[in-house]
Amino acid sequence: MAPARDRRTGFSRRRQYGAFLAYVLAVAGALVGAALLVASRFNPPAFAAMRMAVASVTAPVSASAAWAIDGVVSVPDTIATYFFVHDENARLRAELKRSEALLLRARTIAYDNRRLRALLAVRDRSADTVFTSRLVSSTASSGRRFALLNAGRAQGVEPGMPVRGPDGLIGRVVETGPAVARILLLTDAESIVPVRRTRDGLPALAVGRGDGMVDIRSVNTTNVRFATGDLFVTSGTGGLYAPGIPVARVVRTGNDSMPARTFARPDSLDFAIVQRAFLPLPPAPPAPRP
């Protein structure tokens, strides 16, 4: 049988001091409790003052402890919220990408519809339309400015016919094949189109620059003033381009010759209209003398 554990302090000074200190603390606690009990019964104001003083000392400690406990308790919620927000952000980003793709497609369709409706309106108004076809390529970055039309002799397209889009004149046919045609664009250096200013009928020439723009040159006397924003349309002179087709807009003010930007941009067009060459009516014969 194991011997019973000796619970006496024995000759250990540490144990003796510990036991003595425990007795002292117990007696002190009992005396403080008794004093507080007596104060609460016979002097309530003093007891309330002591209670508030103790509360003032212990309140910051209690608040810090409560804050620490709340922080520890909120850790799982914070982690769960983080993963939820991360997943939600990923889902929203994916949905945003899908929405951007749909929005871009809708804008493209709307833009194509507007251009095609404008082209159909031009075709329906024009009685000299030969064929409407697609522009399959253009040489907007080379030294010359040509475009290829997906229509040729089989569709009635012949050299010399003007080609236009919904916004204005594109150029004229210079070569044809059985099912394709080559178009000399307005911006080519070999292109010269008779034009007139819309606000006063001033005659001029639209000459290609080879850099995507044209020069508007006066055919009258010198010191003809061009203003920024002046609009020029075909004049019908020469019998090739019908009058009134939009050609270009002047980009800066000056005299005699100014650069202008064409209304039709072949690099942004899909379809074009081929028209018959315009032949102005011959002058009326003089009336017979009586």
Image: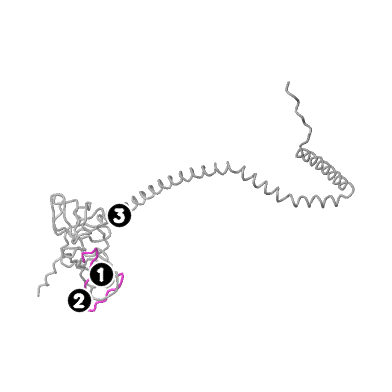
Q: Amino acid at mark 1?
A: Pro
Residue underneath mark 3: 115
In the shown orientation, is residue 86 left or right of residue 156?
right
Q: Which residues are magenta?
A: 209-229
Query: What kind of element bears circle 1?
Result: strand
Q: Amino acid at mark 2?
A: Asn
Q: Is residue 162 magenta?
A: no
Residue underneath mark 1: 259
Foreground of the two, 1 or 51: 1
Residue underneath mark 2: 220
Q: How far is disc 1 from disc 2 in space, using C-alphas? A: 17 Å
Tell which tag, 1 or 3, sits nearer the viewer: 1
Q: Which residue is depicted at the point 23% across and 70% down?
A: 216
Compared with 262, 219 (above or below) is: below
Query: What kind of element bears circle 3?
Result: helix
Q: Which residue is depicted at the point 62% across and 45% down?
A: 71
**Among the two numbered marks 2 and 3 on one chain, the one whose residue lies closer to the N terminus:** 3
Q: Is residue 221 magenta?
A: yes
Circle 1/circle 2 CB separation < 8 Å: no
Residue 65 at x, y percent in the picture: 67, 46
Q: Amino acid at mark 3?
A: Arg
Residue 10 at x, y percent in the picture: 78, 34
**Among the two numbered marks 1 and 3 on one chain, the one whose residue lies closer to the N terminus:** 3
Does residue 20 appear in the picture of this structure? yes
Picture quadrant where residue 209 is located: bottom left
Tell which tag, 1 or 2, sits nearer the viewer: 1
Q: How many marks?
A: 3
